[in-house]
Image: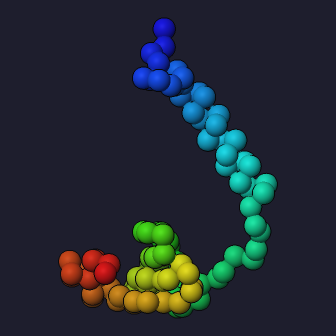
């Protein structure tokens, strides 16, 4: 027997998953499509790329650098070399 949330319908993991899937699929069908922006700046293969907040992207490359990018402008805001990466202070994104 399922428990009902106070004042709400019964919660089901299947229902939640189905609704989430429907929202994602609907977004893909109706979303504004445009050409993705290519971020140019590393001298070698990019091995990791993370979006750490709504407007920051961090990428790591075989060129021994980490680059912090603005997701809005596509421009590099910081570049850290392999020697700077070893420092705990360099890991903080301000």
| Residue sticking out furthest to the front | 7
- Whether 18 is drawn above or below 31: the answer is above
Please name the colour scheme applied to the rendered image: rainbow
Quadrant of residue 53 within the rendered picture: bottom left
x, y percent for residue 43: 52, 91
Q: Residue at x 48, y 89 (%)?
A: 76
Q: Which one is in front, 13 or 5?
A: 5
Q: Residue at x 48, y 83 (%)?
A: 69
Q: Which one is in front, 90 or 13?
A: 13
Q: Is residue 62 in view from this perspective? A: no
Q: Residue at x 67, y 46 (%)?
A: 23
Q: Residue at x 56, y 86 (%)?
A: 73
x, y percent for residue 90: 26, 82
Image quadrant where one finds the C terminus: bottom left
Q: Is residue 14 in view from this perspective? A: yes
x, y percent for residue 85: 29, 82
Disc count in the image? 0
Residue 39 horizontal side relative to residue 7, left or right: right
């Amino acid at each position: 027997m399922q428990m009902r949330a106070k004042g709400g319908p019964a919660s089901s993991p299947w229902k939640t998953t189905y609704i989430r899937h429907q929202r994602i699929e609907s977004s893909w069908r109706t979303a504004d499509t445009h050409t993705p922006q290519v971020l140019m700046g590393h001298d070698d293969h990019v091995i990791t790329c993370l979006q750490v907040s709504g407007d920051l992207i961090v990428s790591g490359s075989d060129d021994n650098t980490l680059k912090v990018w603005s997701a809005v402008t596509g421009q590099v805001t910081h570049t850290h070399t392999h020697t700077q990466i070893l420092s705990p202070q360099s890991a903080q994104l301000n």
